[in-house]
Amino acid sequence: MSCVICAGHAPALACDPCRRRIDDHLAGILAYRHLAEDELLPGRGGDSRTGERGLGIRIDALDFVAGHTVLDVLELWARDIRETYGLSAWGPVSLDACRGQADPALALLTDVIGFLRSWLPRLAADFVPVDDLAREVRQCYLQAQRAANAAPAHGYRVACPAPADVGDCGRMLVVNGQDLEDEVTCRSCGTTWSVDRLLVIVAGEATGAIWMDGEAAAARAGVDVRTLRRWAATGRVRRDHGRYDLKEIQAMAAAL
């Protein structure tokens, strides 16, 4: 049987690694909720990675802390799961969770995350839309990460160049940050790469592509990000879901 989330082998609908990943994302959301409170302080509206500070309050942090974004999504899943398995309705449960609490939104978020985490083994076994749950929990995790101003500065995708039966593995590896000593493991073939070696190998292949966000790609190629966007608009470099092929940009920059 194949996992409905990653297509790997699984004894049920979702494999254990995917179940653990959902659990990690749920735990991370709660951790980021506490960090996001600091972003409500005046002057914390900038980027903590660069040391820049803004003058006002970050709206995404305010919405997250107030329970207007992530909490809404997770509550819908709690309602759906309770209806699916014949549990008590979410409405009265949610009222009990936040009654008398100094921070009702935090109390409610803590309660709904606790409920989802406790039910994950059952959901992985027979909850039909568990793949949709995994996708939306991940989206909530990333949204919470941004609200807490903790998102990695840059990210990029690289096709795994490990040898396979026919050609290379080809599984897309997601690399966050810019530390070349970091490691990334391919979930398809199991090969572990250091980021620096991975980039050297892929950059040396004629067909390899290194997909990076615009600012990171422009910085590595030594061009202005506005120039990069003009190249993409005229079809001179490829753009896919907001990411650009670094090798094509470097070739264009070298021809200037």
Image (cartoon, rainbow, N blue to C red):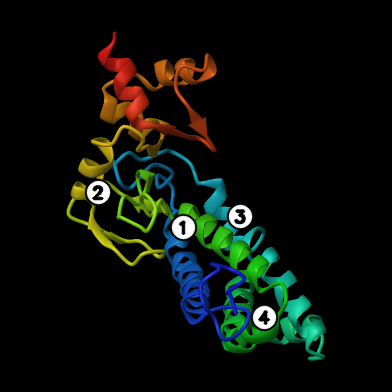
Query: Callout 1, which amino acid?
Result: Gln
Where is residue 85 drawn, in percent x and y?
Answer: 78, 89
Query: Callout 2, which amino acid?
Result: Leu
Where is residue 84 drawn, in percent x and y?
Answer: 80, 83
- Residue at mark 1: 145
Query: Callout 3, which amino acid?
Result: Asp
- Residue at mark 3: 63
Question: Which residue is more in the foreground, 95 or 225?
Answer: 225
Rounded to the nearest angstrom, the CA distance separating label 4 from label 2 is 48 Å
Rounded to the nearest angstrom, the CA distance separating label 3 from label 4 is 18 Å
- Mark 4 or mark 1: whose residue is earlier in sequence: 4
The N terminus, quarter of image: bottom right
- Residue at mark 4: 98
- Mark 1 or mark 3: whose residue is earlier in sequence: 3
Q: Do the residues labelled 1 and 2 touch (CB within 8 Å)?
A: no
Question: Which residue is more in the foreground, 131 or 68?
Answer: 131
Question: Which residue is more in the foreground, 41 or 119?
Answer: 119
Where is residue 170 drawn, in percent x and y?
Answer: 41, 51
Q: Which one is in front in this view, the residue at disc 1 or the one at disc 2?
A: 2
- Residue at mark 2: 198
Q: Do the residues labelled 4 and 2 touch (CB within 8 Å)?
A: no
